[in-house]
Amino acid sequence: MSASILTVDDSASIRMTIKLALSDAGYSVDEAENGSAGIDKANAGNFDLIITDLNMPVMDGLTMIEELRKLPAHAGVPIIFLTTESDEAMKQRAKAAGATGWLTKPFNPEQLVRIAKKVLGR
């Protein structure tokens, strides 16, 4: 069975790029356009990995991670930040909130697939 991945980003083109890269690698990908929708999707589904942007309308990625980490169902789910931010202080905040990893945009689709395989162990 392929791993199920949720991608949360307010950019439709970024979501499409992520979906294409991960689908081609055999993963099942679902999408949400902001942190609030991401929490709804995460609660409705059963995801093996969540990839989220940081800066989004309605709810940002950091707040979404903090909210998800409060829920036992999502405590162990790896969450990767995919963002234009590269600030060290923000990376520390993300790690403290429960982010598993960090990938800076623009990103290389092959690199994203490698990270997904590493984090998922498959």
Image (spheres, rainbow, N blue to C red):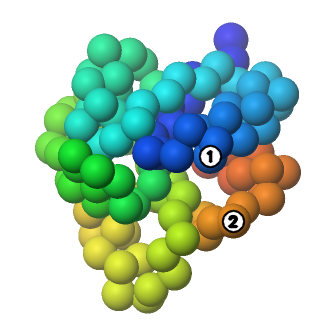
- Residue 111 visible somewhere in the drawing: yes
State the SS at label 1: helix
The quadrant the N terminus occupies is top right
Residue at the spot x=44%, y=86% of the render? 87
- On screen, residue 78 versus residue 24, left or right, reads left
Q: Is disc 2 placed on a helix, strand or loop?
A: loop
Tell me if residue 75 can be seen. Answer: no
The CA distance from mark 2 to mark 1 is 9 Å
| The C terminus: image quadrant | top right
- Crowding at mark 1 (Cα within 10 Å: few <14, some 14-19, many 20+): some
Residue that appears at 71% across and 41% down:
17
The location of residue 120, given as percent across then percent down, is: 62, 39
Tell which of 50 and 20 is nearer to you.
20
Q: Name the spot of residue 61 as percent of width and height, x first.
A: 33, 54
Q: Nearer the viewer, residue 13 or 8?
A: 13
Q: Is residue 14 left or right of residue 25?
A: left
Q: Amino acid at mark 2?
A: Pro
Q: Nearer the viewer, residue 54 or 122?
A: 54
Please report contact status of discs 2 and 1: CB closer than 8 Å, yes or no. Answer: no
Q: Position of residue 98 (x, y in %)?
A: 32, 58
Residue 22 in the image: state x and y as whole percent: 73, 34
Residue at 18% x, 35% y: name it.
71
- Which label number is shown at residue 106? 2
* Quarter where residue 111 is shown: bottom right
Residue matched to label 1? 14
Q: Eyeballing the image, is 68 above or below 96?
A: above
Residue shown at the point (41%, 19%) measured from the top left: 46
